[in-house]
Amino acid sequence: MTDPERVYSAEELAAAAPPDEPEPPPAPDETLTPEQRAENARRAEQDRRDRHLVRRLKQGDEAAFRELVHTYQNRIFGLMLRMIGNRQEAEDLAQEVFIIVYRAIGNYRGEGRFYTWLYRVASNTCKNRIKYLKGRNFHRSLDIDETPQAQMPTAETGAVITFQSQVPGPEAVTEGMRMEKIVQRELAALDPDHRLLIVLRDVQGMSYQDIIKITGLQEGTLKSRLHRARLALKERLEPFLR
């Protein structure tokens, strides 16, 4: 996928699904805090389970594919909803991602995390759909209150930050929902690459290490772009926060 303006078919996206890359060696255990050791153990267990499911899927076991979909469908739907801003489009796009994964699973060699490989496929698919929708009089429609999947806490990414959890007292629901809608609208106005970084880091709570694997950015570039994306979003939100 080298042409930034071209819209690709699902078959082309599957054929172009990136191979996974080896993960860097973990830090020596004695240098880690108890929390970091626990996190590494949890990641290792998830990766072990994912590799087992991928092996079964490559052998034609469709039950393994259903289990992978069940494990990751809410997170992928949440990514698509925040990126596209339309529930029906997000549902269709999440389904397309898993179809592409099914067709492209041979590109996953088991050298890196399945989780980050899946998100690389999802990110490429989402950017492709955004190009398709651009200029087609596409109207976003998002009711945050009706989309709990976009905000679900998960063992992988931690609790998603929402304005409903930031506003104390009985006004939390109303004010939180109002701000969620404003944030989504202003987020949708950002450049898609900036939008993706904010969603991955600030909405879904991913580590820099995982975002680097998903986007292919160098750490310095990632942090610089994320900083600019946050400043752009903050500027757009300032009129609503006075």
Image (cartoon, rainbow, N blue to C red):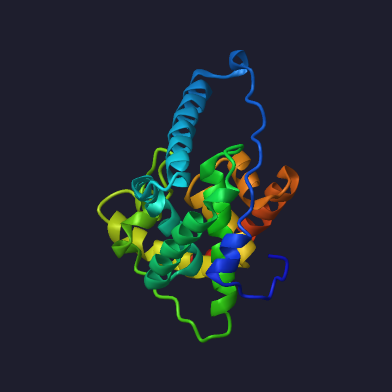
Residue sticking out furthest to the left: 170
What residue do we see at 73% from left, 46% from top? 218
Asked if one can make out residue 18 in the rendered structure from this viewpoint, the answer is yes
Q: Observer-nearest residue: 61 or 198? A: 61
- Which residue is depicted at the point 60% across and 13% down? 30
Judge whether 45 appears above or below 173 on screen: above
Q: Which residue is at the front of the view, 16 or 94?
A: 16
Q: Is residue 33 left or right of residue 24?
A: left
Figure quadrant of the N terminus: bottom right
Could you tell me residue 168's position as x and y percent? 33, 48
The answer to whether any part of residue 81 appears in the image is no
Provide residue 5's location: percent of width, then percent of height. Answer: 68, 75
Count of marks, rendered view: 0
Which residue is the extreme one toward the front? 59
Measured from the top left, where is residue 155 in percent x and y? 40, 38
Above or below: residue 82 compared with residue 27 = below
Determine the residue located farthest toward the top in the rendered image. Answer: 30
x, y percent for residue 137: 51, 86
62, 187: nearer the viewer: 62
The quarter holding residue 189 reads bottom right
Q: Residue at x 28, y 50 (%)?
A: 169
Q: Is residue 141 above or below residue 41?
A: below
Give me the residue at 53% from left, 85% from top. 136
